[in-house]
């Protein structure tokens, strides 16, 4: 079976998630998480991947990227990162078999407030898991870059992110981001929200209708739901014939 979320629509932000094989903790050591970040940096250099945020946990990754319309940048980047990380790990551990589980999942996220919510949700991942008390305590995440622009090996595209969040400056991004992190920690708003990892798209009703329209005929039948003012398209498994019928050029 093939899934509809394997296609990227240009001009949209995508939240990508990928788990290790059988949810094993293959990224439990910092050196392996750093290698994932290294290859993320390389994908930015090689293909121009526009990275907005990232988090590497012990058994899965979150990556927020923007599709600016250049063909196959996201798939090629993910192939490079996932392939090299898996190869290096297996060689070092004298291990055979898959490093990653199912292929990565992609969720379209609307710009503005929904994008900021996704950003904060990603940064709080290891706090939700009970591993750290604050996202600053987890090394391999975009939180540190969002709060302090690094002098070298910068991964996040700040200009792109600020524009998509409809903010005016990096200072506004930094203070707004930290304020929302602090608010979530204070209110213990740390529940897992499957909309960010199991949907085809998340945003306003207008945004969802736009995505469905661009998916073509099959988009008309995709299930939509709403919760507290946020709309989402649920993923749907398609046959290979449906997959090619709904391909977006």
Image (cartoon, rainbow, N blue to C red):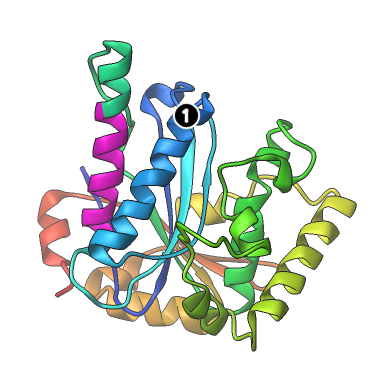
Tell me where residue 52 appears, x and y as whole percent.
49, 65
Furthest-top residue in view? 94
Q: Is residue 173 magenta?
A: no
Establish if 50 lies above or below 132: below
Tell me where residue 32 appears, x and y as whole percent.
43, 30
Tell me where residue 4 appears, x and y as whole percent.
27, 58
Residue 5 in view: no
Which quadrant of the view contains residue 223?
Answer: bottom left
* Predominant SS of the magenta segment: helix
- Local packing at callout 1 (Cα closer than 10 Å; few below 14, some 14-19, many 20+) is few
Between residues 232 and 73, which one lies in front from this camera angle? 73
Residue 176 in view: yes
Q: At 19% from the left edge and 64% from the top edge, which residue is drawn?
A: 72
Between residues 157 and 203, which one lies in front from this camera angle? 157
Is residue 15 rendered to the left or right of residue 76? right
Q: At 10% from the left edge and 55% from the top edge, which residue is drawn?
A: 241
Q: Secondary structure at mark 1?
A: helix
Establish if 177 lies above or below 152: below
Q: At 59% from the left edge and 59% from the top edge, which residue is drawn?
A: 145
The span shown in magenta is: 74-87
Q: At 71% from the left edge and 80% from the top edge, which residue is drawn?
A: 172
Q: Quadrant of the N terminus?
A: top left
The residue wearing badge 1 is 31
Tell me where residue 2 appears, x and y as whole percent.
21, 47
Is residue 18 rendered to the left or right of residue 247? right
């Amino acid at each position: 079976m093939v899934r509809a979320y394997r296609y990227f629509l240009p001009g949209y932000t995508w939240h990508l998630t990928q788990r290790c094989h059988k949810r094993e903790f293959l990224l439990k050591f910092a050196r392996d998480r750093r290698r994932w970040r290294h290859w993320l940096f390389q994908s930015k250099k090689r293909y121009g991947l526009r990275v907005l945020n990232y988090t590497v946990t012990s058994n899965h990754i979150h990556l927020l990227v923007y599709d600016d319309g250049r063909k196959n940048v996201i798939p090629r980047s993910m192939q490079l990162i996932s392939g090299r990380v898996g190869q290096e790990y297996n060689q070092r551990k004298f291990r055979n078999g898959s490093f990653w589980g199912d292929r990565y999942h992609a969720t379209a996220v609307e710009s503005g407030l929904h994008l900021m919510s996704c950003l904060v949700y990603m940064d709080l991942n290891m706090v939700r898991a009970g591993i750290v008390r604050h996202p600053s305590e987890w090394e391999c995440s975009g939180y540190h870059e969002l709060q302090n622009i690094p002098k070298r090996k910068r991964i996040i595209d700040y200009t792109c992110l600020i524009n998509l969040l409809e903010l005016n400056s990096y200072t506004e991004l930094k203070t707004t981001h930290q304020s929302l992190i602090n608010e979530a920690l204070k209110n213990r708003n740390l529940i897992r929200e499957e909309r960010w990892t199991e949907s085809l798209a998340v945003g306003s009703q207008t945004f969802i209708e736009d995505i469905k329209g661009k998916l073509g005929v099959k988009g008309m039948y995709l299930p939509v739901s709403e919760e507290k003012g946020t709309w989402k398209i649920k993923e749907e498994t398609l046959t290979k014939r449906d997959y090619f019928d709904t391909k977006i050029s």
